[in-house]
Image (cartoon, rainbow, N blue to C red):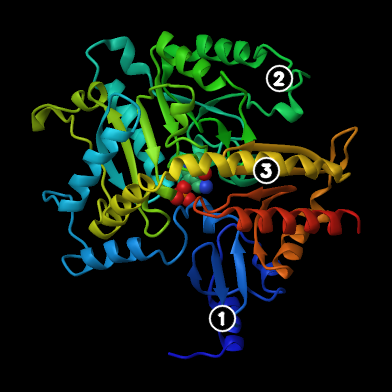
Amino acid sequence: MNVPAAQLEEWDKEYVWHPFTQMKAYRKEKPLIVERGEGSYLFDIEGNRYLDGVSSLWVTVHGHNNGELNKAIKGQLERVAHSTLLGLANVPSILLAKRLVEITPGGLNKVFYSDSGATSVEIALKMAYQYWRQQGNEENRNKRKFISLVEAYHGDTIGSVSVGGMDLFHSTFKDLLFETVHAPAPYCYRCYLGKQRGGCRLECMDEVEKIVQRHHQEVAGFIIEPLVQGAAGMLVAPEGYLSGVSRLCKQYNILLIADEVAVGFGRTGKMFACGQEEIEPDILCLAKGITGGYLPLAVTMTTDRVYNAFLGEIEEFKTFYHGHTYTGNPLACAAALASLELMEKNNFMGRLREKIAFITERLKHFYSLEHVGDIRQRGMMIGIELVLDRATKEPYPPGADLGHRVILEARKNGVIIRPLGNVIVLMPVLSMGMPELEELLNVTYNAIKSITED
Ligand code: PMP
């Protein structure tokens, strides 16, 4: 069907309700309709080329339209497109589970499949809750709450919103949510204890410890986005924060749930963020980059300790009654296997570390812009927080719509990025080459300059 561009634009506004989007504003702008992709670039229906500066939605690992990934998906398509895991098994889901157990932090020996980051979190919460209910010890059966961080984002289903901590996204639904204990977020630029990044001894951990001490008897799990709270604006935790939380969980008999939906699969410069501080969570959530960004897939991985608590006779009701129709989809699992294979070839991780160092160096230059308040980077995750006044850290008012104006300016110059409020987010495709990274940083710099000086 060859539909003219103008017609598609009209139908997009007429029929499609876009996520996280104020449609009144969206309908006033010309939509960018993507037609195809090639490597680090996307092309719209008018043939314009854009550098993909946010990896679609933080997912793309080896670039768009990658021959190897296409081949793996097509190969599987010619065998079977879908087959259920309810009562049956399929080849790619078995091979992928084995591979994931081999490469994830120690002890995570079991893989439960689903289709999105939110479902992987939902499963983790239900698993942790049911785990404690099935303990012999009466006291442990009371462990039914969760601790999460203020500013946390774990997805948009009711369970994952319950452990979320972002007022803008979550407060509307508060009457529908279960009670969660929130610990303060390590937002070092605006440290609530008035400390400076690098100039503290992690006093914020003392507060986390107090909260854990107070609630541990009723807490099933502590859920955390390891190293970087992405949706909150790329809040990079100080070194030792993650391992501190892990230590507390062990000490107080709480399951640690690591939500690596955004940070997993190389984003922070190591395969998994937990590996950066050598921690071993009890439950690990993975999605986004798992298929290289090609098909929807997620996993919730856990230890033998958790898994074994679910073994029993039917009448003991220990079965985990949870599952989705497309769970363990063979096409998505085949894509994931191919993506992992590519990550092991051609010194992929070594080259990634070189790119990260290059970005770190180039980002320093951004401080020459008066309204750049804070630059946060962990690996290939970057957040540039723009402020009205650098001395007082006064934020721009929401009505200024600054982040959005900056990304539209970048788009005019051939780069797609997406803001989180007044934080400009860069999430380069992991396979991007140095010249493309340079283009991304230059266009972003100029867009910030032009809008903030306006
Ligand atoms: N957890 C984290 C840390 C995320 O960043 C996201 C998505 N940005 C999710 C969960 C939800 O993933 P999905 O959008 O695939 O449901």
Looking at the image, residue 16 sits to the left or right of residue 184; the answer is left
Horizontal and vertical percent for residue 413?
73, 68
Looking at the image, residue 111 sits to the left or right of residue 418; the answer is left
How far apart are labels 2 and 1 at the CA level? 47 Å
Residue for badge 3:
383
User: What residue type is disc 2 on?
Assistant: Gly
**Looking at mark 1, is its residue's CB closer than 8 Å to ligand 1?**
no
Q: Residue at x 61, y 27 (%)?
A: 237
User: What residue type is disc 3 on?
Assistant: Gly
Q: Earlier in the sequence, mark 3 or mark 1?
A: 1
Q: Is residue 142 above or below residue 400?
A: above
Q: Within 10 angstroms of label 3, few (less than 14), some, or many (20 or more) residues?
A: many
Mark 2, secondary structure of its residue: loop
Residue for badge 2:
198
Q: Earlier in the sequence, mark 2 or mark 1?
A: 1
Q: Where, quadrant-wise, is the N terminus in this rendering?
A: bottom left
Q: Within 10 angstroms of label 1, few (less than 14), some, or many (20 or more) residues?
A: some
